[in-house]
Amino acid sequence: MNPMILCYNIQPEKLGRIRVLCLQLGIRVRVAQPEEFAFPIGVLAGVTDAPKNPAPAEPFDDEMLVMAHFKPGMLDAFLEGFRQNRIPTVALKAMLTQTNAVWPADQLHKAIAEEHAQMQALRKKK
């Protein structure tokens, strides 16, 4: 499968800059629409079939990126590209896994938002 990034709630200007970076790195960009948030992440990434009647998803406004099918070294190049191109960071990022491929976007969002909050709390303690 070809490398791709799923983009959730990314503002148009930032999305344009991410698209340019991804074009340079050979990464396909897939913008998830709010009506697709109920579908498992793997459906949008092309690795699982869509359920017939997905449960409604809890809406969220935070930006979130999901990287899928990245080849070795691609994640480092992508993150370095963010820094070099001064693209404002997206706090919530995840790699597609067998586990989260079956989760809808709101479940993944909740999991990585909690993880992010815990990491921020640990940084403040140090």
Image (cartoon, rainbow, N blue to C red):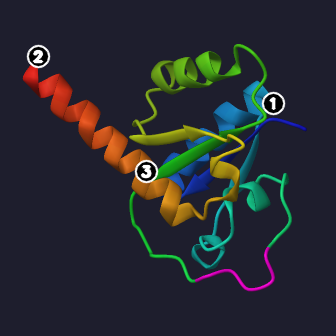
Is residue 126 in view from this perspective? yes
Q: Residues within 10 Å of mark 1 (few under 14, many from 20)?
A: few
Query: What residue appears at the point 60 percent right and 48 percent down from the top-left corner?
Result: 16
Question: In terms of sequence position, does the residue under pointer 1 or pointer 2 come before the other?
Answer: 1
Please state which amino acid type lies under the numbered disc 1. Gly
Query: What residue appears at the point 79 percent right and 76 percent down from the top-left corner?
Result: 51
**Disc 1 to disc 2, C-alpha distance:** 38 Å
Residue 122, percent from left and from top: 18, 26
Q: Residues within 10 Å of mark 2 (few under 14, many from 20)?
A: few
Question: In terms of sequence position, does the residue under pointer 3 or pointer 1 come before the other?
Answer: 1
Q: Is residue 123 above or below residue 68?
A: above
Query: What residue appears at the point 54 percent right and 17 percent down from the top-left corner?
Result: 80
Q: Is residue 56 magenta?
A: no
**Extent of the magenta region:** 51-55
Residue 31, percent from left and from top: 66, 59
Q: Residues within 10 Å of mark 3 (few under 14, many from 20)?
A: some
Please state which amino acid type lies under the numbered disc 2. Lys
Q: Which residue is mark 1?
A: 26
Please state which amino acid type lies under the numbered disc 3. Ala
Quadrant where the image shows the C terminus: top left
Looking at the rendering, which quadrant does residue 115 occupy? top left
Determine whether the residue tagged by mark 3 lies in a helix, strand or loop.
helix
- Label of residue 111 in the image: 3
Q: Is residue 72 above or below residue 48?
A: above
Q: Are marks 3 and 1 in contact (CB under 8 Å)?
A: no
Q: Are marks 1 and 2 in contact (CB under 8 Å)?
A: no
For marks 1 and 2, give the one nearer the viewer.
2
For marks 3 and 1, give the one nearer the viewer.
3
Left or right? Give the position of 80 relative to 125. Answer: right
